[in-house]
Image (cartoon, helix red, strand yellow):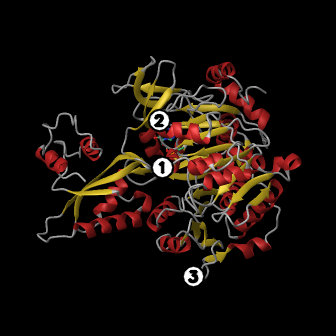
Amino acid sequence: MSNYHIKHLEEYYQVYRKSVQEPEKFWEEIAEEHFLWQKRWDEVLSWDFAKPEIKWFDGAELNITENCIDRHLATRSDKTAILFEPNDPNDPTEHITYKQLHERVNKMANVLKSQGISKGDRVCIYLPMIPELAISILACARIGAIHSVIFAGFSATAIASRVNDSDCKLVITSDGSYRGAKTIDLKGIVDEALESCPGVHTSLVVKRINSDVSMKAGRDKWLQPLLDEASNTCEIEIMKAEDPLFILYTSGSTGQPKGMVHTTAGYMVYTAYSFKNVFQYKENDVYWCTADIGWITGHSYIVYGPLLNGATTVMFEGVPSYPDFGRFWDIVQKHKVTQFYTAPTAIRALARQGTELVNEYDLSSLKVLGSVGEPINEEAWHWYNDNVGKNKSPIVDTWWQTETGGIMITPIPFVTPTKPTYATLPFIGIQPTLMSESGEELMDNQVEGKLCIKFPWPSMARTIWANHKRYEETYFSTYKNKYFTGDGALRDEVGYYRITGRVDDVIIVSGHNLGTAPIEDAINEHPAVAESAVVGFPHEVKGNALYGYVTLKDTGESRNQENLQKEINQIITEHIGPIAKLDKIQFTDGLPKTRSGKIMRRILRKIASKDTGDLGDTSTLQNPEIVKDIMDNVV
Ligand code: 6R9
């Protein structure tokens, strides 16, 4: 049916119009024709952005894993579902068929049950990019447990706060992980975290690197023996459409990370439909998204979206630079990858290596290239287009968020003419709009404003775990009756969108969202620090890097600044993780502040970016003299 697979621009406009004029009818048709339901819905959509309360397919019953796995068994049981490419290129690739995936998920689900996990319980997953990660996610979904995946680069403190926020009962981890030539002691990090997580009764440990880890009696259990014992059949748990499927934490501009809650039916329908169209997926394609499953991109477009379509999805354990910077291209060549979805920060890192390596490999299998995570700069776009796509594979620059669950603004390859740095047009069913500073909706083209969404879509997050008020305040209070994204954007003369970046205090470093507040909180833990402010500055590879301004307590002692820098970064690593380390630290006698005491980050951002031509009016500051001082000592 054409609604499901769009193939030319006219059809896009036609389907798009239908999806916004009659959204209920549109999504109902998609839901009816392409999924298995245990019980049909009573109502396609009910919503109120003021409360906010959003329900899709209310009354329906289903299990997402029946849709991801069971229903493919009749026609695709021997087809590869997950193609696992290990860290070491000399280790064998693992092809997990749909039939094997079914067995492994069922076994894992039975293990979880045997450990006392049942519907509604929260399970934390802290694993490297190995098959057990996808299998654990699906096993949770099979029995109705709510998975909360924590990226395996986060620190013990970060794990503990997330585990406690959602009161997880069980953790799944591994004895360690491979990362290029290094190994990382995941088990040790989890052990440290669990010291402050009284609610966790069990920790299941996957053996990956065969390291010598300590196992806490009564709590820690090797996973394999339990799997060996478990039955390979596990009935699906019947879930309601709006039952939570998972929690995924994302950084906010202030305070604790937000546990975004995604529910079952709407998320399923939207990720499946968007995957199919955005990647123009066809039956024998080999699709590869290089993201980590610890982020939303991996949830929606490594696990759920591809499996819902019966696709072959590549999971890569390693890094783009190991054993050398040709690794990505080696994998594309080896598995004849057809869709390749990565992040601008990876493209920039690869582009820095020149074109010699990329030209050594046969990339002719590629049909579609994707980009996600941050705005893609023009230079990176062209490098990607010329050297990877050879000017024949369209680049889909996909804009979306943890909160949106699925891709929101994107070209459809071979359908939407692309334009470098533009995410182009709203995807089917998505109604974006731009708002002026004064809160007016900007109706014309060639305008710039704050990006909002006017109408619900099936995969939007429904709440923040245990904090619905924060959900309302963060997303629905800035503009009445609109979901506010936190991003700025401009719309060109033909209605294409270009995302200009965050308008709040979230900085995107190598595609990872980092809130400035938690980093500042960590810095301020250092006994010598009085106050700090963190801003982003442009970085050739990471997109943005972090610049910290730090004032020290006046103790009369002299201090070694180099040691202080190391100690500060150490504290940040402990509290958040190495991704949040500061690239530059400037010690200063003061921070520019407004009369009401707010730090003027706008000025600090410009100074860190060496863009001091126009700092605006600084005369109204409490301490205007500090600005020159900071400028004179910029690092
Ligand atoms: C999917 C994901 C969300 C933030 C988002 C925006 C930035 C993502 C982008 C993009 C420009 C793109 N972002 N994709 N900016 N162009 N194609 O990345 O989710 O980790 O929650 O980040 O990332 O600023 O608001 P998440």
Q: Which of the marked residues, 1 or 2, is nearer the chain's N terminus? A: 1
Are the residues flagged by discs 1 and 3 in contact, CB closer than 8 Å? no
Q: Amino acid at mark 2?
A: Glu
Residue at the image position 56 percent from the left and 40 percent from the top: 384
Q: Tell me if mark 1 has few (under 14), some (14-19) or many (20+) residues whose alpha carbon lies within 10 angstroms of its own.
A: some
Residue 512 against residue 152 in the figure, above or below? above
What kind of element bears circle 2? helix
Q: Quadrant of residue 365?
A: top right
Residue that carries the numbered disc 1 in the rendered image: 352
For the residue labelled by badge 1, is the local secondary structure a helix, a strand or a loop?
loop
Q: Position of residue 585 (x, y in %)?
A: 28, 58
Above or below for 274 versus 629: above
Is residue 302 at least partly visible in the picture?
yes
Q: Distance of mark 1 from mark 2, alpha carbons?
A: 15 Å
Residue picked out by circle 3: 214
The amino acid on which the numbered mark 3 sits, given as a three-letter code, is Ser
Residue 252 showing in the rendered view: no
Q: Residue at x 19, y 50 (%)?
A: 591
As drawn, is 516 to the left or to the right of 42? left
Q: 91 or 236, which lies in front?
A: 91
Tell us which disc is closer to us: 1 or 3. Answer: 1
Q: Image quadrant for the C terminus?
A: bottom left
On residue 378, which mark appears? 2
Q: Residue at x 67, y 55 (%)?
A: 315
